[in-house]
Each structure stands twice: as structure tokens, then as C-alpha cells.
Amino acid sequence: MMDRYTKLQLVGIYASIVVFLIFILLPFFEMFMASLRPLEHLFRSPYQFWSDDFSFQAYRDMWKTVPLLGRYILNSVFISAMVTGLTMILVIPAAYAYARLDFPFKNASLALFLGVNMFTGAVLLIPLYRVLSSLGLLNSYWAMIVPGVAFLIPTGIWLLRSYLEKIPLELEEAAFMDGASRLYTLRRVVLPLAVPGLIVVGVAVFIGSYAQQFLFAITFNQTREYQPLPAGLFEFIGYQSVTWNEMMAAALTGVLPVMIIFLYLQKYLVAGLTAGAVKE
Amino acid sequence: MATLDLKSIGKSFGDAQVLHDIELSINDKEFIVFVGPSGCGKSTLLRIIAGLEEATTGSLLIDGDDVSDAHPIDRGISMVFQSYALYPHLSVFENIAFPLRVAKLSKSVLEDKVQRAAEILQLTDKLNLKPGQLSGGQRQRVAIGRSIVREPKIFLFDEPLSNLDAALRGDMRVELSQLHRDLRATMIYVTHDQVEAMTMADRIVVLNQGRVEQFGTPMELYHHPATKFVAAFIGQPNMNFLPATVTDVGDAGLCVQVDAGPALVLPVESAGVSAGDRVEVGIRPEDITQGAGGLNINVSVVERLGGISITYGTTDGGTRLCAALGGTADIREDQKAELKLEPKDCHVFDSAGKVLRRRQAPVLVE
């Protein structure tokens, strides 16, 4: 066996994993702890890890403090879903073309896509504002969806292209011999075999869009009803005080649906990958 | 009816020319095998016929019509790929039905045709399985089923048996020959295995470095190889080549002195050679007998297969030699043996590798 470790190595490996996980999960844990404490105990000194007055009161109060909270959560999911859907519609044919067809400036344009990815949305906010303004898309869902799609297409193409390239060319040649058009082959042969890859790309795009909507929302959208959760969380910052515990509770509640979807898809992913191991 | 004519087909990939001026005329209902070592261009030629690859020069005629630019469907051609190229996510039924779905046939006709193909290939009880659940031979049959279901005029096979084990390969060989007889269609089959070529073909095309080395029936290739390359490629074990010098050209044939061996008078057409020329005498292992023939070898290995003993050794001149002697031949490793060549069994190749045609070759059984 190649992967046999000594006791010491195993201890080292697990210790590293623990450190890594703590680094990643501690903020979530602290969010959760903060959401359970009453507001007046949040800034208590010295810090108390455990106290008897923990309660889920913040999870009830947050809906009253910010009446539109439910709407914000739905907006977040809706915007991300739209971004994912549109991105996939655009990325699938593009990635297939990059994987299989020969056309002028193929590699150059592919490199360009990667180049675009190096800019963060923040650098382009002002030009984007002008573009969206002249298209009349400001203060609508589209103001958050269109830039989201634009910024996620390059990643999508790069991810999916490498997956599609792994599908045996002979399958497509066989379909061609049998008279199938490119699109028919794409629909009936390539995409069904690429399902695990499509899920990977879909999840990556969904998460990417969830993460980036805050920036677009606060810049391009003033309409309260359209705000996604990250922007909506601002409403917990009042004139007098910040209800940190309710804000944490709301944030956790907002992340929850995404986490559930992701956990579910992760299981599906593993199954999909083994079922997709097709050739011989 | 499906005849296929290739007119000076050439193919280059960049600077590399892989096919030179291929001229072939294939008759209706013939089973043609393209055979040759890897890299000889046989698969490329097949892909050009299929329409997957475009010829750089020349044209392709089916039933006399130029189809060089036609789609495979319009050519009436189907192909079985080396890897079978089955769609892993579709059932056997859907795999076979795929070309019919593309052609948008009605449900009843489609089911009928798939059913019939499945019966021919004994797949009726496997129609609901996925390709992953089938054995190699069954997958092979599904791939064939997909190609026969739309009743093309010409079938192409690209090394279809190379992924199967030896026993199954033998069975499938027989099944394919049977299928050819049942379907009465033109078939073109690519292989690097000369046994497959010899057993299945009506006629064989031997390709070497992008050129047609010889095109003829298996027995023609065996008894009248046109070049040294064909002689060496066809026949198992391979033909022996003994260097020799021409001593005289007479009416009875060519007189040669085999290096460190006997002087022989060989009944071959001797135009173009004269005394003093260097030639090579080709002799098949199965045509060599033990006895006083003046050819001494040092035996190195004897493989006794029961019926025959395949004997390997080197002549006194240092040439490697293989002889298929009798099963009980009195021959031992690390000892000398004397072998005999019959002049009528000998092939002669000039220094360019071209054959001097034999006068007394066996009558061909067709």
C-alpha cells in the first residue's frame, strides 16, 4: 500500500486538518454563539464562553427588526439561481466549442477570459454602473444578475471545458457517423455524460454568485424589495444600536438553504463521479 | 449494390504525408481487409472512407458517384469503432436505436428494426442493460447492432476485435464472417493481425508506409507475394530470407548460390536479373523439411507444439532461420541439423525487394 502512514505522520496529518478546520469554522461558530447571547451580554468582559442566558430569542426577534428579511433571503437564492441558470446556458455551448472545435483565436480568447477573471468586480464598478445605467437596468434584479453572469462565465468555461475534453472523442464520431448533428450529439451524448462536471460547475457558479452579489447589490440597486441578504443585513445597523445577535442569526439563517443544497449535491457528486466512470 | 473506388487518395497532416496515391477498386459484397503494421495509414484510410477525415487529394466513388464531400449518412456507410464507442448512459436498446432516432423513424418501425438486429446478434435478453453491464463480446455485438440497424451499403470495422481476449476473438471472427454472409453487404475491416486478415477476407490490402503494397486474395498474397514486405507480413511463422548470389540465368530458371548453403535452380521469371546480382531466397517455415539439402543450421530453440516442432536457429552464414518441422522430428537444441529446400517452394526477391514471379506456384483454390 502506498498510503500507509506511521503513527507520527497520522498525528501530524490530523493535527493539520484540525488547525485548518478551526481556522475556517471558528467564524461560523462565533457567529452562532453570538446569535445565542442576549445583546447586552455580547460585550461583556471578561469573555465568557458559556453562560446560562443562551436563547434562540434573536431568531424570533430578527423577523420583527427587519420585516423584509424573508424577502432578502429569497432574493439571494433567486438571484444566485438566475445567475447560475443563465451562466450555464451560456457556458455549455462555449465550453463545448473550446473543447472540440477549431476556430481562429481560440487560445488567445481563452487566455483573455482568464485575464478578465483577474479583475475583481470592484475595479470595474464605475464603468459597469455606466453600462447598466445606459441599459436602464439599475435598481432591478437584472442589475445584480447581469454583472454576476458576466463575471462567472470565464470560470465556468475553464472548468467545463476541461471536463468535456475528457469525454472520448470516438463517442462523438460514432454519433456523427450515425447522422447526428453537433447539437443533437451535445444534447443526447455529451451532456448526459457530463452531468458530474455540470454539477461541479453549477455549484461553483452558484457559490460564486452568492458571494459576489453584495458588491453589485449595494452599488447598482437602491430598491429595498430587490436587495439580497448581504445587503439587507445592513438594516440591523440602526441609528442607536446594532443588534449584532440578530444580525448573526439572520446571516446564519440566510446561509442555511445554500448549505443544505450544497451538502445534498455533494452526496450526488460522489455518486455521479463513480457512475460517470464509463470507459472500460 | 455497393462498389467503392478510391482514386489516387492522398492524405497529409501538415508536412507528414501518411497516404500516397491510393488506388483501390472494391466490388459489391466483398469482405476487404486492410492490414499493415501500426502507422501504415490503414486507420486513416478507413476514416477517409467513413467521412471522418477528408482526403488531401483524390476522390472517393460509391457505386460510381463521387461522394468525397458527402456526409457518412449520404454515403450509406456505418462504422464499428475499436473502443466500440457505446453510449454508456443509454441502454442497449437505445444504443442500437440511436441512428434510427436521429433519422426520426416512427416508434413501431424503430422497435421492429432494433428487435431484428438484436435477434441477429443474440442480444434480445440484454436490451434493457447498460453497456457497462455487458462483457466485451456482447459490447462488440451491440456496436455491430448499431451499425447494421440502419442497413448501410458499406460497413467499416476499425480493429474491432483488438480489445478481446484470444478465445473470444476466434469466436467473433467466425461470427463476423457469418454476418457478412447473412447481410450480403460490402465490408471493410482494418486490422494489424494477419490471421484475421487471412481468415476473413475475400481480398486483402497490405499497406506499408502509406502505400498499397499488394491487393489480392489471401492465397494470392500467400503464394505470390509481390514484395518482400508482403512475404514477411503474411504467414505465421514469418517467411525466412536467405541471402544468395545469382550464378546463371537459364531456361529452367534462376541458378543461385545461397550464402553458406546449397546451390539451387529456382523456377522463377528471371527477367531483369543477371549473373552476379545479389538476391534473397524466401522460404516459408512450413516448406522446409529435414534432410540432405545442404543447408546446415545451429538449432537454438525448439518449440514442440505436438503436431509440428517450430525450430529456430542460425545458418552457417549467420542468417536466422525458422523451420516448422514434423512433430516428432529428430532435432535437439544446441545441435546441428541439416535442412532441405524444395526449389518450387522458394520465392526470390531482388535487391529492391520486388518478387521474381514463381512459375510453379500451387493452383489457387477460390
Image (spheres, coloured by chain):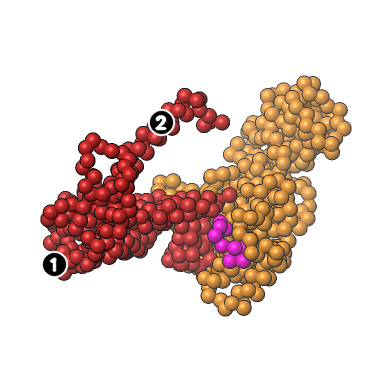
- CA separation in Å, label 1 and label 2: 54 Å
Q: Which chain is red?
A: A
Of all residues shown, which one is farthest toward the front?
A52
Write the residue at 35% across / 52% down. A204
The numbered mark 1 sits on a residue in which chain? A
Quarter of the image for the C terminus of chain B: give it: bottom right
- Amino acid type, label 2: Ala
Name the dominant secondary structure of the magenta segment. Answer: loop
**Residue B92 magenta:** yes
The magenta region covers B85-94
Q: Nearer the viewer, residue A219 or B320?
A: A219
Residue A33 placement, left or right of A125: right
Residue B264 vertical position relative to residue A258 in the rendered view, above or below = above
Q: In percent of the image, x 24 and y 62: which residue is there?
A: A64
Q: Residue at x 70, y 54 (%)?
A: B172
- On residue A134, which mark appears? 1
Q: Is residue A170 visible?
A: yes
Colour orange, chain: B
Is B323 magenta? The answer is no
Q: For the residue labelled by badge 2, is the local secondary structure a helix, a strand or a loop?
A: helix
Q: Residue at image x 56%, y 62%?
A: B90
Residue A151 shows in this picture: no
Residue identified by numbered label 2: A15
Image quarter in which the N terminus of chain B is found: bottom right
The kind of residue tagged 1 is Ser
**Badge 2: few (under 14), some or many (20 or more) residues near its Cα, within 10 Å?**
few
Q: Is residue B174 left or right of residue B57?
A: right
The residue nearer to you, when weighing B51 against B272, is B51
Q: Is residue B275 left or right of residue A274?
A: right
Q: Quadrant of residue A63?
A: bottom left
Q: Quadrant of residue B333?
A: top right
In the rendered view, would you say B185 is above or below A163?
Answer: below
